[in-house]
Image: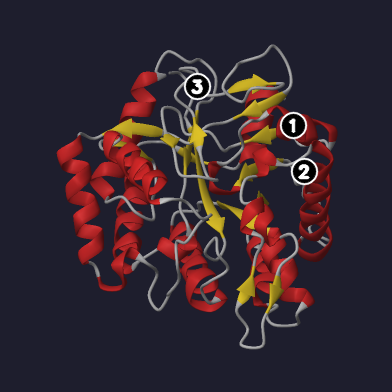
Amino acid sequence: MTVAPHLILTVDYELFGDGSGRPGACVLEPAYRMMRLAECVDASLTFFVEALEFIALSEQERDHRARDQLRAALQGGHDVQLHLHPQWSKAESDAQGAWRLDMKRWRIGDLLEEDVRQLLRKGRFWLENEIAAHVAGYRCLAFRAGGWCIQPSEKVIAALLAEGFELDSTVAPGQWRAGRGEWSDFRAAPSLPSWRVTGDVCQPSGSGLWEVPIAVGNIGWRRHLAVLLHGKKQKNAGLAPGCIGSYRGPEQSRVEHIRARMVRLRQLGEVMLDFSTMPADVLIDVSRQWLSRFSTIDEPLPLVAIAHTKNFSASSERNLKIFLAWAKSSGLQFSTYEQWLETTHG
C-alpha cells in the first residue's frame, strides 16, 4: 500500500428504532462527546442522520436542537449524510409524547421504488435546506439503510441512482441477520474495499453506485463473547449516559425470535469496526486486519468505522480516544466519503 488509507468515522445519528429514547441523552450529548474527541486529532465525523425522525420532531415543534447541532457540526468540518428508517415516514405522537411508528415499514428494501425515491427526496431536502443551506460546497451524496435493511437492493439502488446519489455504505461483508422484518445477508459481498453496483448490492458492476462497506474482522468467539458480557455489566448496559430506550423491532413469533438469536450466535467472532461497542484493542485489531487484507491496493483504501450515538457509553469514549491516537500515529488520514471519492476517482 503506497498511499495512506482513509479512515472514515461514521455515526448513525438516531433514536431507537421504535421511537423510544430522548434526543438529548441518546443523540445530542453523545454526538457532542464524539466531536470533542475527534477534533483533538483533527478528525472529521460523518453523521448518517435519520432525517425522517428529526423532521417529525420539527413538525411537532418538540425539539430543534439536532438541527442546530448538525449545522454547527458542518461548519466545524464534520459531515452529514442520509440515513433512513421508513417506519418514521408517517410518525405520530400520542398525548404523552410517545411516538407511534409504522413498524410494517421497517425495511426500506421492501418498499416500492417510487416510495424509496420520495423518502430519499424528503430526507435529502431537509439536510440540504435545513442543515446545510449556508455551507458552501455541501453535497448529500451518501446513504446508509436503516437496520442494514437495504435488501432486496435492486429498487433501492435504482432509486439512489435516479436521485443522483453517488455512494452507499450499508454493507458489512459476511454479516447477516435473520429477524423477521429486519433481515440482511451480506455473505455474498465481494472481497473488495469498494465496488460499484447497479442492482444487487453484493454484486460488483462496471458502473453505477459506489458501495463502500463497513470494515469487519474476526476476533474469535471467546473474545467476542467476553466483549458482549462486559458490555452488559456496564452502567447503563452499554448505552450512552442517561439514554434509555427499547430495541423492539417488527413483531415476530417465538420460533422466529429463536432463529434470529441462533444466527447471531453463529456469527460470534465476526465484528464490525464499531467504536461505540468495541474496546480499543479490538478496534485496532480489526483495522489492522482490514488494512492487511487489502495491502496490495495502490489507490487510497477506505476504512469505514461505524458507531451509534445511543450506544456511545463512558467506556466507548475512553476506547475511541485510544483508537484515534493509534490511527493518527499509524499514518491513517481522517477523511469523509467525498474526500475519498475526490482522491480516488477524481
| Pointer 1 residue | 155
* Residue 328 point in image, percent of width and height: 39, 44
Residue type at mark 3: give it. Ala
Residue type at mark 2: give it. Val
* Residue 37 point in image, percent of width and height: 43, 62
| Pointer 2 residue | 116
- Residue drawn 69% across and 68% down? 54
- Residue drawn 55% across and 64% down? 18
What is the spatial separation of the Cα atoms under label 2 and label 3, in whole angstroms? 23 Å
The residue tagged with tag 2: helix, strand or loop?
helix
How many residues crowd mark 1 within 10 Å: few (<14), some (14–19), many (20+)?
many
* Residue 256 point in image, percent of width and height: 41, 44
Pick whichever, 241 or 258, lies toward us.
258
Q: Is residue 301 left or right of residue 96?
A: left
| Pointer 3 residue | 189
- Relative to residue 40, is residue 151 depicted above or below? above
